[in-house]
Each structure stands twice: as structure tokens, then as C-alpha cells.
Image (tube, rainbow, N blue to C red):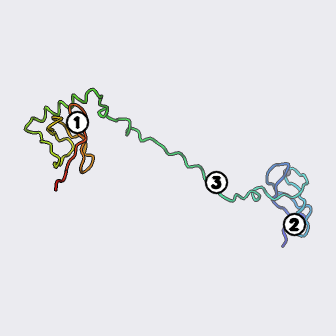
Amino acid sequence: MNRHEIGNEVEAYCTKCKRDTLHIVTAADGGVISRVMCQTCKSYHKYKPPAAEQTVEPTVKIKKAKAVKEKKVGETKEKKPKAAKPTSRKMQNFELILEDHPKSDRIAYELAGSYTKGMVLEHKVFGTGVVKSVISDTKIQVQFREGMKILVQNYKTE
Ligand SMILES: [Zn+2]
């Protein structure tokens, strides 16, 4: 049952048709096809295995992942212009905070005290200040009229 016999139909690559076509085996040597005739263009040529078989791709080319960078529309678009506070208004805000905190509402600053953001302090030297941020357990950043100061908090005296 050798199908590579003269007169057999085989699929092969035709150099004239530039594609795989049906060929008639015209010469075979020991079961190996040597010459064929193209059924399409009727030309005789050396047997060439079908291109489809020749180019067995070792790895399937993975299509480049589409750059899925779809911006979530509306998410960044509608950003409130609230954060953009002009520097000039900083002191205005500061004054406003002080207005909101009458003297009785202000906390006398001391090293051992514990403070949180937004607290209004009364400092012996710098005067009234607002806690802008808590840097660490022992440090706070306070906005005074004359500028930002780093103050100590939770200071432990033995
Ligand atoms: Zn051909």
C-alpha cells in the first residue's frame, strides 16, 4: 500500500502555481516521490512537499495583546477643581479657621500633648496655629501666621 507510486495523486507544492495543488506522481524512487506533474498547470517538476506541511509553525504566534488602555470616561474628567487652592488664599483660610475657633476653643500647646489634624493650638511663642498634619506620633506640622512649624507632640518626660 505504497501511495507514493507513479500514477498516484498526491498533494504537492507547485512551483508554477505557487501553491499546493494535486499532482500525479511521475517518478518515484523507493517509495520517495521524486517527480510530479501538476494537475492544474500540467507542468512536470521536482516533487516538493505541500507548503502547508513545510511550514509547520513551531509556535503559534500569539497575537499582541491589544493595548487595553481604555480610559474610564468620566472618572478623571469630572475632577472637582476644589483641590487647586491658590496660595494666596492659604492665609485667608487660616484666618477663617481662627475665626471658627474662639480663644476658648483653642488648645494650649504643650510638648506632652497629643494632637490631630485640624486642631487649633495656642503656642506661647508662635501664637495661634492650626495642625495641618500629623507627621508621626511625636511630630506635627502646624500652620502659624508666620509660617509652617514642626512641633513636638506626645513628648515623654520621665
Ligand atoms: Zn501547477
* Mark 2 closeness class: few <14, some 14–19, many ≥20 residues within 10 Å: some
Horizontal and vertical percent position of residue 17: 83, 49
Residue at numbered disc 2: 32
Q: Which residue lies most toward the bottom here?
A: 1
Q: Which residue lies most toward the front here?
A: 158
Horizontal and vertical percent position of residue 96: 17, 31
Mark 2 near mark 1, Cβ–Cβ under 8 Å? no
Foreground: disc 2 or disc 1: 1
Q: Based on the displayed image, in which of its 4 quarters is residue 150 positioned?
A: top left
**Residue at horizontal 75%, vertical 59%?**
53
In the image shown, does 44 or 106 lie closer to the viewer? 106
Q: Exactly how many numbered labels are in the figure?
A: 3
**Residue at horizontal 20%, vertical 46%?**
116
Residue at numbered disc 1: 143
As measured in the structure, the alpha-carbon distance from the residue carrying label 2 to the one carrying label 1 is 93 Å
Label 3's element? loop
Give the residue type that dot 1 points to.
Answer: Gln
Give the residue type that dot 3 points to.
Answer: Lys
